[in-house]
């Protein structure tokens, strides 16, 4: 702990010594005063082995958050309204399945993680069994698998998934959706638990996904523990209908609190008529952590440093914070370094449900995130064709020799995979500003979510500088424009936009 405190102090003093504050006599925008050496120092620290991959809830994650907060403090950013400091605690839990658990049938014993997987609840029971088809009720589709059945105080056994007449465009999402519905239907009818029989061809996928520890919201974890006992069971017996009673002894899912935070800092605007029109700037600072159990890890290198994903984004956010604090824009700007992106956009999802400023005062979100870069003459914008911001971004990047490029057609889902998405779902126009690439090919994937995503001496720090300058200048342009960009007609988030800003306008 003492070593870490000394490290923080040295880094803060080093940053102060870099200086570089904009000379007010110089009319040039502060973006031009940024230096590659300064940004390199940020990246080398954030992606250092000492931070051990910045996994949510670890000391390395908290140290990165502290570093960002102290940069905000150094440059004169203030805490968000009603916040005493720069941190917004995000209550998360590391959820792990119990290591033991057994279901005894008339013929054999089923063991947890080998023969069945716990989805929710816990159980110590000896119960009779009722078979209930797929366990669904949908009168519009003519489905009632509980018709004529008495399942009170009994264990319900159902088939996996849904009947053939209901298509499943995304198996994972649909399965989770229908599993929750099945659990609810069984609970309302007084069942003591539900077993969902899963086909062998799907077992490997679900066993891999459900047995690994997961970071979840504390509220969801507590709710899951209190729900009806529900497990996926591997179908290995052909005489399932002959089950009469089952004895179940399965403890609940285990959880450990993870202490992590979003880091929030505000720069006031200079136009008094625009004090309630915030531009929000986001970048996630967490990454995958360390461990030999992670894909691509080796005994020689098992730290996932996350230099490109998303060290570059955090550096760009810091560059924008310094530049806009040095020379303020018309609108106020809220900077959010978010946590938990790699675990399912947790930090940004928490923020939009617990905003520091009213969402209706949030006019545009510029997020920065990326997997890497292959073209140093462009930036790639996820969602470029969704809002009216294209010309503004293009003009802001041009002074730094960068053109803009939309996310590739074969990777349209990238818009839905970063922290812009929770804001977009609330109706706020939101884009992601990413390092330049044309397609997610092998050149990108060789570093993406791998230990090799680290800072070496041949890292392109000149591109890091120009990328950060262009990002900063785009933030400035958004904060200075007469009218902030909006969703284009026909966009899926336009209705939410109307609802959000209806009373404001």
Image (spheres, grey):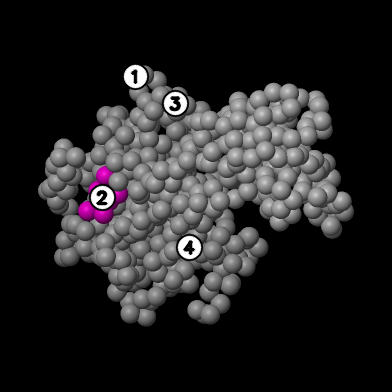
Q: Which residues are magenta?
A: 63-71
Side of 221 relative to 304 (left or right):
right
Binning the other alpha carbons within 10 Å of mark 1 as few (below 14), some (14 to 19) or many (20 upward) gives few
**Residue farthest along the front direction in this orientation:** 126
- Residue 39 placement: quadrant: top left
Mark number for residue 66? Answer: 2
Of marks 1 and 4, the one in the foreground: 4
In x, y percent, where is residue 21? 18, 57
Q: Nearer the viewer, residue 293 or 464?
A: 293
Q: Nearer the viewer, residue 466 or 136?
A: 136
**Mark 1 sits on what residue?**
300
In x, y percent, where is residue 369? 43, 46
Secondary element at tag 1: loop
Quarter of the image with the N terminus in it: top left
* Mark 1 and mark 4: Cα distance apart in space: 41 Å
Side of 491 relative to 54 (left or right):
right
């Amino acid at each position: 702990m003492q070593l870490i405190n000394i490290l923080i102090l040295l880094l803060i003093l080093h940053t102060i010594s870099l200086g570089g504050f904009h000379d007010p006599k110089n009319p040039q925008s502060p973006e031009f005063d940024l230096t590659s050496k300064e940004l390199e120092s940020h990246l080398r620290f954030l992606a250092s082995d000492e931070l051990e991959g910045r996994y949510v809830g670890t000391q390395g994650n908290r140290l990165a958050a502290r570093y960002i907060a102290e940069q905000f403090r150094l440059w004169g950013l203030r805490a968000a309204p009603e916040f005493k400091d720069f941190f917004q605690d995000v209550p998360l839990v590391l959820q792990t399945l119990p290591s033991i658990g057994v279901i005894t049938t008339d013929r054999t014993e089923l063991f947890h993680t080998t023969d069945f997987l716990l989805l929710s609840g816990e159980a110590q029971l000896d119960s009779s069994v009722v078979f209930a088809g797929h366990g669904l009720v949908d009168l519009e589709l003519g489905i009632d698998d509980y018709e004529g059945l008495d399942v009170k105080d009994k264990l319900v056994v159902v088939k996996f998934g849904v009947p053939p007449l209901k298509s499943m465009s995304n198996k994972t999402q649909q399965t989770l959706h229908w599993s929750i519905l099945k659990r609810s239907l069984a609970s309302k009818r007084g069942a003591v638990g539900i077993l969902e029989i899963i086909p062998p061809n799907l077992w490997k996928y679900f066993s891999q996904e459900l047995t690994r520890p997961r970071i979840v919201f504390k509220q969801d974890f507590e709710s899951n523990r209190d729900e009806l006992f529900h497990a996926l069971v591997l179908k290995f017996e052909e005489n399932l209908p002959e089950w009469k009673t089952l004895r179940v002894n399965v403890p609940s899912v285990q959880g450990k609190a993870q202490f992590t935070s979003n880091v929030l800092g505000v720069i006031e605007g200079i136009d008094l008529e625009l004090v309630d029109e915030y531009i929000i700037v986001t970048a996630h600072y967490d990454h995958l952590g360390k461990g030999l159990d992670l894909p691509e890890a080796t005994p020689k290198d098992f730290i996932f440093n996350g230099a490109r994903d998303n060290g570059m984004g955090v550096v760009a956010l810091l560059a924008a914070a310094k530049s806009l604090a040095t020379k303020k824009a018309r609108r106020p700007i809220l900077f959010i370094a978010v946590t938990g992106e790699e675990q399912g956009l947790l930090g940004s999802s928490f923020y939009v449900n617990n905003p520091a400023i009213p969402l209706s005062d949030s006019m545009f979100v510029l997020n920065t995130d990326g997997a890497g870069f292959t073209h140093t003459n462009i930036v790639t914008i996820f969602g470029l064709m969704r809002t009216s911001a294209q010309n503004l971004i293009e003009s802001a990047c041009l002074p730094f020799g960068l053109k803009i490029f939309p996310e590739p057609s074969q990777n349209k889902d990238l818009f839905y995979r970063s922290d812009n998405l929770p804001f977009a779902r609330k109706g706020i126009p939101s884009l992601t500003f990413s390092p330049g690439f044309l397609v997610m090919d092998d050149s990108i994937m060789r570093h993406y979510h791998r230990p090799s995503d680290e800072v070496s001496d041949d890292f392109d720090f000149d591109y890091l500088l120009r990328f950060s300058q262009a990002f900063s200048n785009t933030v400035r342009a958004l904060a200075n424009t007469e009218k902030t960009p909006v969703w284009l007609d026909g966009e899926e988030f336009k209705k939410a936009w109307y609802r959000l800003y209806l009373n404001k306008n």
